[in-house]
Image (cartoon, rainbow, N blue to C red):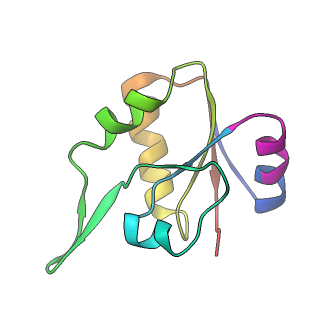
């Protein structure tokens, strides 16, 4: 199941034990992140612009289990949505939540 949630709902889910998967770049993550967040960059910044991380699924699934309940977040929701779709298609996670905006 996948659904978009606002920041307050995400906070409540984290308090109930959901994992927080931050799909922002390492540089963005270094500027600040949710406590205990897992960071797996969905895209990298290159001189040519953003490029999808070819190892995203392998990296994410190495730290997540299918039965985990996960809140996925980025800055504005775009990368998070793509990450959710990729994770659902590849692994069929039981529960993914997407924060629409984290700024």
Q: Is residue 38 above or below residue 49?
A: above
Per the rendered image, the range of residues in magenta is 11-18
Residue at point 76%, 51% (across, down):
10
Q: Is residue 51 above or below residue 12?
A: below
Residue 35 lies in quadrant:
bottom right
Q: 15 or 42: which is nearer to us?
A: 15
Residue at point 52%, 62% (across, down):
74
Residue 51 lies in quadrant:
bottom left
Residue 82, position in %: x, y?
A: 42, 51
Q: Is residue 55 above or below residue 90?
A: below
- The residue at the far bottom in this view is 47
Residue 1 visible in this rendered orientation of the protein: no
Quick check: is 12 in the magenta stretch? yes
Residue at point 59%, 50% (across, down):
37
Q: Quadrant of the N terminus?
A: top right
Quick check: is 76 in the magenta stretch? no
Q: Main secondary structure of the magenta part?
A: helix
Residue 2 lies in quadrant:
top right
Q: 46 or 33: which is nearer to us?
A: 33
Residue at point 43%, 35% (across, down):
87
Residue 68 visible in this rendered orientation of the protein: yes
Q: Quadrant of the C terminus?
A: bottom right
Left or right of 67: which side holds 58? Answer: left
- The residue at the far left in this view is 48
Residue 14, position in %: x, y?
A: 76, 44
Left or right of 75: which side holds 57? Answer: left
């Amino acid at each position: 199941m996948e659904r978009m949630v606002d920041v307050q709902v995400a906070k409540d889910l984290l308090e109930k034990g959901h994992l927080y998967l931050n799909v922002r770049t390492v540089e963005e993550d270094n500027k600040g992140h949710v406590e205990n967040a897992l960071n797996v960059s969905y895209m990298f910044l290159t001189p040519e612009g953003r490029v999808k991380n070819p190892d995203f699924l392998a990296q994410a699934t190495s730290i997540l289990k299918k039965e985990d309940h996960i809140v996925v977040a980025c800055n504005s929701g775009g990368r998070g949505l793509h990450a959710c779709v990729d994770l659902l298609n590849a692994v069929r996670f039981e529960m993914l939540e997407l924060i629409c905006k984290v700024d």
